[in-house]
């Protein structure tokens, strides 16, 4: 796992502090603001790690389910139909969501996807959330899940 160390988190916060301290007007001094930046970086890293662990757990279960399907030919056939349904549902997404899911399927990190598409982290997260919601809705509508 690529969990950041405390030193990495402090380093990230120091880069932000160094980059922004000239732009900020300090009402109570620099230390409360600097600790606030550190707190935000730390909480953001924690949320990112939590999302990553949840995503890994979700994918692990899906892979294990597909692996279990290999035990019988009938189940494999069902999984092939499911793959076709997933492809169809992916086709129903808008162009940005299609591109994002293509990158995700090919194993790109969120940072790489952001860079490739030139979008913000928030835009990426919202698009992934909405895309997953659309995929689930389409799959349920077609009776695949």
Image (spheres, helix red, strand yellow):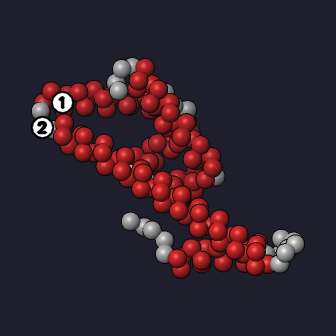
Tell me if I can see residue 118 in this picture: no
Q: Is residue 90 left or right of residue 124?
A: left
Which residue bears the numbered disc 1? Answer: 75
Percent of width and height locating residue 36: 71, 69
Considering the image in quadrants, where does the C terminus appear? Answer: top left
- Residue ID at (23%, 27%): 78
Q: CA distance from mark 1 to mark 2?
A: 8 Å
- Residue ID at (18%, 30%): 75
Local packing at callout 1 (Cα closer than 10 Å; few below 14, some 14-19, many 20+) is: some
Percent of width and height locating residue 141: 43, 20
Q: Are marks 1 and 2 in contact (CB under 8 Å)?
A: yes
Rendered view: 6 above or below 116 = below
- Residue ID at (41%, 56%): 53
Which residue bears the numbered disc 2? Answer: 71
Disc 1 element: helix
Percent of width and height locating residue 95: 55, 35
- Quadrant hosting residue 139: top left
Query: Among all residues in the image, which is located at the extreme top?
Result: 142
Percent of width and height locating residue 61: 30, 45
């Amino acid at each position: 796992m690529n969990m950041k160390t405390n030193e990495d988190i402090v380093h990230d916060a120091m880069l932000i502090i160094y980059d922004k301290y000239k732009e900020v007007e300090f009402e109570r001094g620099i230390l409360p603001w600097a600790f606030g930046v550190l707190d935000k970086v730390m909480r953001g890293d924690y949320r990112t790690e939590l999302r990553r662990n949840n995503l890994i757990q979700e994918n692990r279960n899906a892979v294990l389910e597909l692996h279990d399907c290999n035990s019988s030919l009938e189940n494999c056939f069902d999984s092939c139909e499911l793959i076709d349904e997933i492809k169809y549902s992916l086709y129903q997404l808008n162009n940005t969501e299609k591109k994002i899911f293509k990158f995700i399927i090919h194993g790109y990190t969120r940072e790489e996807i952001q860079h490739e598409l030139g979008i913000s982290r928030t835009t990426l997260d919202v698009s992934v959330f909405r895309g997953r919601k659309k995929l689930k809705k389409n799959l349920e509508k077609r009776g695949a899940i």
